[in-house]
Amino acid sequence: MRHSPVSPTLLTGPLSLNRWDILLLPLVFGGLFLLAWGSRQMAAPYEFGEALPISLDPASLPGYALRTVLRMGIALVCSLLFTFVYAKAAVSNRRAEQVLIPLLDILQSVPILGFLSITVLWFVHLFPGRLLGLECAAIFAIFTSQAWNMAFSFYYSLRMLPKDLGQVANLFQLSAWQRFWKLEVPYAMPSLVWNAMMSVSGGWFFVVASEAITVSEKSISLPGIGSYIAVAIERRDLAAVGYAILAMLTVILITDQLLFRPLVAWADRFKFEFAASQEVPRSWFLELLRRSRLLRLVMTLPVLLWNRVRPLVPQRQTFRLPLPKLRYWRRADPWLDSLQIALLSGAAVTSIVLLARFVLTEASGAEIAQVFLLGSYTLTRVIILTALASLIWVPIGVWIGLRPRLAQRVQPLALFLSAFPANLLFPVVVSFIAAHRLNPEIWLSPLMILGTQWYILFNVIAGAAALPNDLREAVANLGLRGLLLWRRVLLPAVFPSFLTGGLTASGGAWNASVVAEVASWGTTTLTASGIGAYIAQQTVQGDHPRVALGIAVMSLYVVLFNRLFWKRLYTFAQRRLALD
Amino acid sequence: MSDVETLLELRRVNKRFASTDRREDIVVLKDIDFSLHPGEIVAILGRSGCGKSTLLRIICGLTPASDGQVLYRNQPVSRPVAGISMVFQTFGLFPWLTVLENVELGLEAQGVPATERRQKTLAAIDMIGLDGFESAYPKELSGGMRQRVGFARALVVNPDVLLMDEAFSALDVPTSETLRGDLLDLWLERQIPTRAILMVSHSIEETLMIADRVVILDSNPGRVKAELPITLKHPRDHTAPVFQRLVERVYEIMTVEAGEQWASGIGHRLPSAQVAQLLGVLDEISHPTHVGHVELPALADALKLKVDDLFPILEALQLLDFAQVAGGDIRLTPHGQAFLDADIQRRKVIFGEHLLKRVPLAGHICRVIDERPNQRAPESRFLRELEDYLSEDEAERVLQVIIDWGRYAELFAYDYDAGMFSAENPGEEGAES
């Protein structure tokens, strides 16, 4: 039987360490030391424009890896805070929701480089004379590759909150704070953890783009694995690329074992189900934490402290937020509705005018048309690649999903593969294309889908694994086989989860086009014409109006493509093929 | 009587939902007047859809009333108050909290200090018989044990008034009987500080086993139809003739509105009953051991039907003129006999004839389909019409019933994907390999 980590009986137990403590202590102290070292490096003095030397010596890799991980960790914490505030705001206010949710959809479609090139100078000015500004810019870039899908997942969880639990919380008069931590966060936890894992994979995919920053023709490489890879590619150092792959593998493996596996195992208790499931995710590290007496003791400290402090804090009535003031704004008043629409349309028109003026300072109308054309090239690539990836991974995913033991092993592997940055394949791809004199317009394209095809795979696996047992038995009983089996049972059954995967994959491919349409290996640079290459090139030249143009056009394509294609299929699937 | 003290008082409580059209609102509860005094258990009985669960939610401040007032100790209730606690039909437990943490929740919200909280929680767990399960998660418990957690959580805050929303109906019969018995013992022995219990139920027998007073609600709109004091001493014996007479009396009161046999118009709330259920009941009535008529309690017993399931069937049978209910008895009409005696194909014909004759909505749909050149009509058209009379959910439910009946009678076909009614049966055009 499991016990909650905080239990009063602990305090009455002997104060001796057990063997789990002995294992855990060095780990905890080591972690603390590394954290301190990494943060000190971040705050080092620095003048903008100064080149930071990156050494290709494998011995410096652990240090780089640590700093990359630290950035990702900070970004993840920020993403979590953002998620809580943003999704909660969207759910508790109808008017805010009408703006915030579509906005999230658009933010998701903006490529990471777009955020980076626009914000980096601002961050640098925020902390003059320190490296912290650049670090913040990099962290912000990683944040933008993590936060949106987490916010979406939390928002959907809040919308789906079981009605009776909400009533229980109201009836027993839980405060907004208690309701958030006792009901809303726990309910959202499993999907939040899952999305955080996907987010971190996304962060790895863009690790080079977020660390080796090129702004206004100045290239700055923040110490980290991403910069290491960038320099290795620039110097055609194949051995260094190998080391980088090895270091990344190790880091991902360690974060998986020490962070995500324990989180998944822990989040299992928050699953909203009342039947005990047979297959419970396990993690050795979580068990270690649970068995360690010292850690449990440490965990009880805040509770004890709170109980001491609590009587000193004024009664909770004074804690109530001044909500009645907001009530007027929430009302379903047609006059307010029109006011909101008027304000929004005003803001939209102003933005379009401002953006157009900004863009037109540099680019002519003909160039704008040209950018739209480039967008359609990338669109063609995205469609063809998503279709190809689906053709390959759907059958394989179904095959794996029907074998539960295999599925359990393949899913983490797919997650790892999705973290593999496209840049690491540049040496292979560029040399191959150059040696065989292939057309880069076609042969660079696969790099786009490289990281995101795995979303199709593991969503299909999950869909096939969820096929009810009685359905499978009925299929066997009827003797369904071959094409008929696929057409009538397997494909319809996995279709809804395939759509989730396909949507993520195609969205990711758009973003990846920025790093995939321009590939270089040493001095050889191959370019495929497309909007991704356009954005990448303009960023290097520091041409802000053109970067803005590129990003705006790409976002437009992504949002339209999602609305007109994926969302429609999604509604169809929900109506027709839902398995319940 | 005990006019001296009234715990809860409802004054002309109304609940209306705005209809999608700007016509008049849909009335769910109408002018409910009622009071709850210390020391009594009151049960609210009514058919499904009479608004009894809504009423409970208004009383405990979860849902606002449209009109009228709920007074708790002479103070109006507009949001949840500390003295009123509720047990939910679906338990409403937090799966990520242990039994202990679930029970503790209400005290925690009140800001009770940790040691006192723990002590009270353990006492409540002890009292309700959950000893030893403190650290278990809800998913490790059986349904009965889960509802015990629900009771412990409601009682630990020492409520004056305990509300029970179908608290036993998600449990199997022996489990619910045990739990009910335990609760009654606690109440009779004054082991719980609760001063009055108000329960909603759809089981007549369960109600009569514990309640001191039964309030019977009418449906469409929900209003108090009758109040029945139960003076039987505890423990009550459900086989005793006095008890049986009470059961029959309640059935009689609940079926009084039999006068309204014709559907009032296309907005009539068709009862949710399936054709197979109608046949099952007809079959039971015609059984040779009953001489042409059956008493309702016996019928419910023989078919193991709860009130919520039985009454829609009875209503449908009367609506279609297959049976008549009077004075707590049900008998077949000649049409009902003919319907029962026919073979499968003939039954469909008879059912269709009665549907067209007695349910205006069926005729309306057929006429609309006929008038259309392509003999098809979208469901949204009929939904919109129904929403003039019914709430959105109710309109969908009624349309669902008529689709089911119409398909059985082969009056029209309905395509789920397209949401389209049509005259001809699919099969020829839509045939797939």
Image (spheres, rainbow, N blue to C red):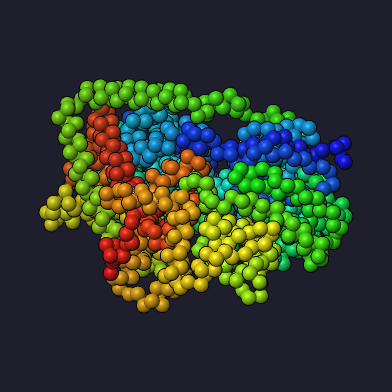
Q: Residue at x 82, y 45 (%)?
A: B195
Give the side of residue A277 with respect to residue A19, left or right: left
Number of on-image labels: 0
Most extreme residue toward the left is A437
The N terminus of chain A - image quarter: bottom right
In the depicted view, which residue is nearer to us: A214 or A2? A2
Of B3 and A440, nearer the camera is: B3
The spot of residue B159 in percent (x, y) is 78, 44
Q: Quadrant of residue B329?
A: bottom right
- Residue at position x 29%, y 58% from top? A390
Residue that protrudes farthest toward the front in the picture: B334
Q: Along the line of sight, which residue is nearer the eye, B221 or A523?
A: B221
A441 sits to left or right of B421: left
The percent coordinates of residue A50 (x first, y second) are: 34, 31
Identify the residue at horizontal 77%, vertical 40% (top origin).
B35
Q: Is residue A441 above or below residue A404?
A: above
Q: Identify which residue, A341 or A32, lies in the foreground.
A: A341
Picture coordinates of residue B101, whole percent (x, y): 70, 51
Q: Is residue B163 above or below residue A373?
A: below
Image point 42% across, 73% down: which residue?
A474
- Would residue A308 be visible to someone looking at this image? no
Residue A295: x and y, percent?
65, 52
User: For this view, does A118 lie left or right of residue A69?
Assistant: left
Residue A341 drawn above or below residue B376: above
Q: Is residue B253 visible in the rendered structure shown here?
A: yes
